[in-house]
Image (spheres, rainbow, N blue to C red):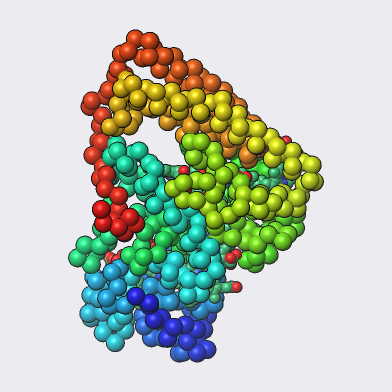
């Protein structure tokens, strides 16, 4: 399914000159632009631009201001498909049978796809895509289908998943009669499973059609998914000193530094999510694999090393990765400061694992064993919800708050809540053990109708 777009790549001396005239056509439209295209540009590419600039002025304006436009990368370079591709937009052929548009005729006809995947970007950005492919971002659909009770026990409806879970994690794209299935599209989740077999959507951080690095360097780009009761990283960041410095000084930061040159201390005075997790610094190279630089797997119920995370063991060595992260810190901090921060973090992990998680898990297993809790479903008995929230909500907040320097999350939203939850949970559990009464089951659990079959494209046929 290799797409042959090279023909159109950098075609000759083709050059698009975009002049900003500053003339506003009407109040609510982007500024009108006058632009010229050199003759060398492929005619089919001109057609896309000529037709779509009027059709979608917002889309056109975005593209025309991107690095891509100035490097002469056109619509065709990304959207061109082959006729037999699964994601080809069948209805688009009709655009070349129009008498009302000079470019709406058959000599410009090419197959296109609305979906532009990491595989398409990889022609020009192979390293970013290779790194991305190893990441948990790219592989999240496999991970969540291995471990998540909402999915495996069918506890939510397909539409709840589409509007919720999959919006962040990604959908498994499907077409029906040449049209993208609306239960899977639109979507730019991090682990979207594309019809060409590739994983992810680069626009989850670099929104189209600007595709800018400066956007992805800002914490808000990550915060669209990394927020809320179960993984409040953006809230944690904004609470930390790093976040408060970002708020105070972000206007002075040099967000547009060329790729690979963004330098702590020079271009910014406190780190963002990207600085710590992705961008290069010192000897540490930029990476599109966010699992790098991590020494713990704190999303999981029991905190383990990333290589011991069973559903998707990292191929990293946690000590090496920890040293990489420390090197980032030490662009601005001394060694003792950095080492002592990690000492805190390790103790927090141990405290959570030993004092809160292990006893709660042991109790849950006992109740299942004795038949006091029913294993066939999840979330339909209070103790299951309590157990879940202990690790998934407050337990994560405690660990993540400590890791990223947010004391309010480590304590008030974290360990403080863990204590309350733990006490209530143990009280209810002990009551069942003492009386031998079975837990109340919510038999009318709403919308527990979701498909429970593990997706074939990932797991193969059952
Ligand atoms: C003669 C006008 C015309 C030309 C030429 C044209 N398009 Fe379109 N295109 C349209 C219209 C109209 C639509 C909206 C149809 C619809 O409602 O989805 C569209 C839709 C699209 C979509 C969305 C398709 C979907 O299924 O959601 C993409 C992507 C696209 N065009 C890209 C291109 C590219 C790339 C080219 C050049 C190879 C191109 N177009 C050439 C008129 C045109
Ligand atoms: C660098 C690659 C790239 C270039 C260049 C590019 N696109 Fe896109 N386009 C994308 C991506 C990525 C998406 C988002 C779809 C996805 O996530 O698969 C998209 C989406 C679209 C859509 C559907 C968006 C919507 O909101 O309905 C249209 C239409 C479209 N592009 C047209 C164009 C046109 C016209 C041009 C040229 C002016 C162009 N694209 C240039 C990558 C590109
Ligand atoms: C707002 C975006 C968003 C929504 C909605 C969302 N998630 Fe997540 N999910 C995330 C993020 C971000 C993480 C990573 C958390 C972390 O590392 O702290 C995550 C982590 C997970 C994990 C843990 C993966 C691991 O490696 O341990 C599972 C499982 C999961 N989500 C399943 C789901 C399911 C199922 C739903 C819907 C019922 C859902 N998520 C809804 C963003 C979201
Ligand atoms: C999780 C967010 C995220 C996703 C998803 C993402 N990027 Fe990036 N990307 C970044 C950040 C942050 C930078 C800036 C690195 C720096 O500071 O130089 C960047 C930089 C880049 C650059 C500039 C060169 C470089 O490596 O620094 C390219 C090219 C790029 N990304 C392509 C891609 C492609 C292709 C994909 C899809 C496979 C993708 N990105 C997906 C966050 C992301
Ligand atoms: C035909 C080649 C080509 C394709 C396909 C392509 N790019 Fe690019 N991309 C480039 C070139 C050339 C640059 C400009 C590099 C520069 O200015 O130094 C660039 C720059 C970028 C940058 C850096 C922008 C900045 O602000 O500095 C990002 C991010 C990026 N591309 C993402 C993508 C994504 C995501 C896709 C797929 C949806 C994609 N590119 C597809 C050639 C391509
Ligand atoms: C579109 C949603 C989305 C965006 C945007 C996003 N992430 Fe994520 N991120 C996720 C999900 C979902 C997971 C959980 C993957 C899993 O473990 O299954 C995750 C996991 C992670 C992890 C944990 C990896 C691991 O190995 O445990 C890190 C670190 C991370 N993201 C950092 C970032 C950073 C930094 C950015 C911004 C530059 C970002 N993310 C942007 C959805 C997103
Ligand atoms: C000062 C550097 C720094 C900043 C800024 C930062 N982080 Fe972190 N982050 C860390 C450290 C350190 C860890 C724990 C690393 C380890 O496991 O050793 C971590 C852990 C994480 C994890 C947990 C991964 C896992 O599976 O255990 C996620 C997810 C994450 N960060 C996302 C983000 C997001 C999103 C932002 C911005 C809103 C952000 N981080 C800002 C340093 C930072
Ligand atoms: C770009 C520079 C920069 C980087 C990189 C950086 N920091 Fe910071 N950090 C700062 C500045 C500036 C402060 C504010 C110091 C003060 O309180 O005066 C700070 C504050 C802190 C604080 C104090 C928080 C508080 O509320 O008292 C801790 C802890 C910390 N950083 C740890 C880290 C760790 C760990 C890393 C790496 C994972 C890191 N920093 C990366 C610049 C940086």
Residue at the image point whose x is 28% and y is 32% from the top: 376
Closer to the camera, 268 or 249? 268
Specify whether residue 276 is in view: no
Relative to 461, residue 396 above or below: above
Relative to 194, residue 67 above or below: below
Residue at the image point whose x is 54% and y is 38% from the top: 303
| Horizontal side of residue 309 vs 171, given as left or right | right
Closer to the camera, 249 or 149? 149
Report x, y in % for residue 120.
43, 71
Q: Quarter of the picture for ligand 4?
A: bottom right
The image quarter in which residue 248 lies: top right
Residue at the image point whose x is 30% and y is 22% from the top: 371
Relative to 267, residue 310 above or below: above
Report x, y in % for residue 73.
48, 76
Residue at the image point whose x is 39% and y is 23% from the top: 366
Relative to 453, residue 106 above or below: below
The image quarter in which residue 346 lies: top right
Report x, y in % for residue 362.
45, 26
In the picture, which quadrant includes the N terminus? bottom left
Count of number-bearing discs: 0
Extreme residue toward the front, this view = 369
Extreme residue toward the left, this view = 177
Specify whether residue 298 is in view: yes
Report x, y in % for residue 341.
71, 39
């Amino acid at each position: 399914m290799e797409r042959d777009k090279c023909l159109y790549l950098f075609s000759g001396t083709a050059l698009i000159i975009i002049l900003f005239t500053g003339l506003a056509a009407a109040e609510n439209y982007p500024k009108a632009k006058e632009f010229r295209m050199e003759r060398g540009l492929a005619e089919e590419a001109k057609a896309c631009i000529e037709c779509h600039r009027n059709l979608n002025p917002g889309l056109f304006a975005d593209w025309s201001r991107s690095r891509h436009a100035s490097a002469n990368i056109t619509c065709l370079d990304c959207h061109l498909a082959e006729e037999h591709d699964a994601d080809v937009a069948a209805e688009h052929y009709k655009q070349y049978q129009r008498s009302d548009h000079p470019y709406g005729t058959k000599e410009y006809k090419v197959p296109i796809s609305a979906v532009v995947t990491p595989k398409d970007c990889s022609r020009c950005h192979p390293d970013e895509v290779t790194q991305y492919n190893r990441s948990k971002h790219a592989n999240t659909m496999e991970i969540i289908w291995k471990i998540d009770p909402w999915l495996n026990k069918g506890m939510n409806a397909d539409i709840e998943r589409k509007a919720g879970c999959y919006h962040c994690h990604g959908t498994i794209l499907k077409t029906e009669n040449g049209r993208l299935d609306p239960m899977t599209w639109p979507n730019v989740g991090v682990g979207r499973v594309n019809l060409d077999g590739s994983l992810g959507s680069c626009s989850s951080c670099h929104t189209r059609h600007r595709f800018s690095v400066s956007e992805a360097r800002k914490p808000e780009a990550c915060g669209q998914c990394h927020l809320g009761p179960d993984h409040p990283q953006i809230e944690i960041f904004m609470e930390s000193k790093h976040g408060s410095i970002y708020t105070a000084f972000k206007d002075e930061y040099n967000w547009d530094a060329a790729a690979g040159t963004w330098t702590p201390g020079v271009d910014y005075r406190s780190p963002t999510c990207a600085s710590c997790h992705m961008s290069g610094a010192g000897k540490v190279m930029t990476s599109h694999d966010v699992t790098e630089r991590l020494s713990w797997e704190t999303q999981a119920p029991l905190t383990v090393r990333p290589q011991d995370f069973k559903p998707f063991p990292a191929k990293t060595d946690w000590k090496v990765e920890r040293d990489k992260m420390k090197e980032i810190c030490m662009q601005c901090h001394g060694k003792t400061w950095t080492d002592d921060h990690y000492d805190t973090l390790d103790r927090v992990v141990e405290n959570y694992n030993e004092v809160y998680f292990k006893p709660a898990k042991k109790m849950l297993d006992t109740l299942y064993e004795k038949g006091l809790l029913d294993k066939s479903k999840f979330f339909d008995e209070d103790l299951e919800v309590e157990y879940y929230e202990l690790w998934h909500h407050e337990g994560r907040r405690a660990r993540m708050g400590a890791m990223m320097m947010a004391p309010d999350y480590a304590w008030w939203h974290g360990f403080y809540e863990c204590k309350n939850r733990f006490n209530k949970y143990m009280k209810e559990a002990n009551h069942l053990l003492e009386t031998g009464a079975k837990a109340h089951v919510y038999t009318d659990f709403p919308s527990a109708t979701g498909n429970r079959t593990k997706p074939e494209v990932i797991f193969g046929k059952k």
